[in-house]
Amino acid sequence: MKAAVVGANGVEVKDVANPVPGPEQVLVKVKAAGLNRADLTVASGRMHGGSGGPGTVLGMEFSGEVAEVGAAVKDIKPGDRVMCSGAAAYAEYAVADFGRTAKIPANNMTFPQAATLPVALQTMHDAVVTNGRLKDGEAILIQGASSGVGLMAMQIAKFKGARLVIGSSTNAERRARLVEFGADLAIDSSDPGWADQVLKATDGKGVDLIVDQVSGKVANDNLRATAIRGRIVNVGRLGGFKGEFDFDLHALRRIDYIGVTFRTRSVEEVREINRRMRADLWPAVESGKLALPIDRAFPLDEAAAALAHMKANKHLGKIVLTV
């Protein structure tokens, strides 16, 4: 089968062996795959968790038709239209754990649309609802809100009853569009006064929850913009892996600072994350209330160009590969 792999001279599309599903896995004939920031890390030759290195097939989420199921898999059968999270998605065939596989809603959802959803849904339900403990009527800030997962976080927050949703983007054009996805206020996190804008919008209190995909240089202003006994969930580090941290301000405001990643979670933990997400959000997915825009679609043969488009950071929403 054809697949996009990490080669000596960058990303190459070449023939590789077809994957074989294990007893608890599903083999899918891939129709579309979604791009994610972590794919850039692997494409550069670095490791992301247990994935990476020469010959690695790229990708973390995909949609398609079930070709085969393992002996222990129930409720999924060949021919089903599914969306999945799992490694090696940029390929004609891919495998996923049954707990990370969901049937595509029986509406007009296309395979490319379905491929945009698995990572964003599971990541941001876990960050906003499970770890962020968002309550009805609270205020939330999403740092890095114009990414696919950021747009989904704002939608989930609105769906779960947030009183005030604030989204950040350093791009003026993308910032202007955040209102389409649930933002009541859009801020520029490169503006030195952004934390003051958040405090003004919350009558000096600060937000109850920050879901942070930026980190680095925004860390201390995050503390200042968070309410006493608020929460910060660290999801990503687009602004840097290290930075100054005001430990006294953290203590004064009694903030719960929570780190999350899928890289150190067990199969059972990820299954539970997906189970909770589907139990909580699936009616909204089926109705189309939770959805992501597709910025651009590329054929599998142009995987390197698709990754370059993502690296340029000029897109809003998701980039997909079609197979």
Image: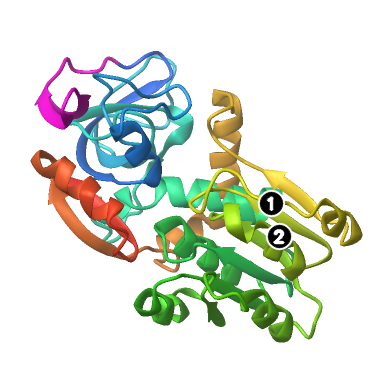
Q: Are marks 2 and 1 in contact (CB under 8 Å)?
A: yes
Crowding at dot 2, Cα within 10 Å, few <14 / some 14-19 / many 20+, comes out as: some
The residue shown at (60%, 35%) is 272
Looking at the picture, does residue 160 appear above or below residue 197? above
Looking at the picture, does residue 132 appear above or below residue 275? below
Task: Give the quarter of the figure containing the N terminus.
Answer: top left
Q: Does 17 lie within the magenta span?
A: yes
Q: Quadrant of residue 197?
A: bottom right
- Which residue matches tag 1? 244
Q: Quick check: 24 left or right of 32?
A: right
Residue type at tag 1? Glu
- Which residue matches tag 2? 220
Report the magenta residues as a range: 1-20
Q: Quick check: 225 left or right of 205?
A: left
The residue shown at (33%, 66%) is 316
Answer with mark 2 or mark 1, whichever residue precedes in sequence.
Answer: 2
Q: Quadrant of residue 176?
A: bottom left
Task: Give the quarter of the figure containing the C terminus.
Answer: top left
Residue type at tag 2? Asn
**Coloring scheme used:** rainbow
Crowding at dot 1, Cα within 10 Å, few <14 / some 14-19 / many 20+, comes out as: few
